[in-house]
Amino acid sequence: MSGARVLPSQLDACNGITSATPEFPLGVYHDVLLDVEGPNSSPRCFTGEVDSSVIRRGMGGAPGRRGPLG
């Protein structure tokens, strides 16, 4: 992967930044996962809802089939 190096001091409280990406050369807000230990190694803010069928698939189950969640 190539691009400009992002420093922890450039990130907001959610580990995000507005900058150019390959898909959005004029800039877009996005999360950055830095290759460091500590709070900047994962996103800090999550929003939205997760569909329970996604959780079942991620846990090894599938709709209509008994898995870890029943």
Image (cartoon, rainbow, N blue to C red):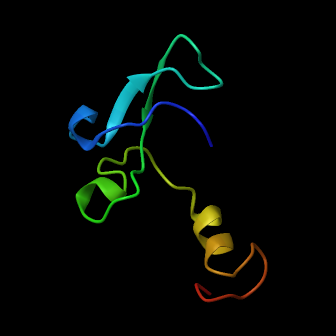
In the rendered image, the quadrant that contains the N terminus is top right
> Residue shown at 34%/36% (left/top)?
16
> Residue shown at 65%/64% (left/top)?
53
In terms of depth relative to the viewer, which is nearer, 23 or 5?
Answer: 5
> Is 39 positioned to the left or the right of 4 in the image?
left
Residue extending furthest toward the right: 64
> Looking at the picture, how far across and down is residue 38, in whole percent?
25, 63
> Looking at the picture, how far across and down is residue 7, in whole percent?
30, 39
Image quadrant assignment for residue 10: top left
> Looking at the picture, how far across and down is residue 18, in whole percent?
39, 23
Q: How many marks?
A: 0
> Is 16 positioned to the left or the right of 24 in the image?
left
Image quadrant assignment for residue 69: bottom right
In terms of depth relative to the viewer, which is nearer, 29 or 41?
Answer: 41
Please tell me whether residue 64 is drawn above or below residue 10 in the rendered image: below
> Looking at the picture, how far across and down is residue 44, in whole percent?
29, 51
> Residue shown at 54%/32% (left/top)?
3
In the rendered image, the quadrant that contains the C terminus is bottom right
In terms of depth relative to the viewer, which is nearer, 40 or 7?
Answer: 7
Residue extending furthest toward the top: 26
Please tell me whether residue 21 is drawn above or below residue 58 in the rendered image: above
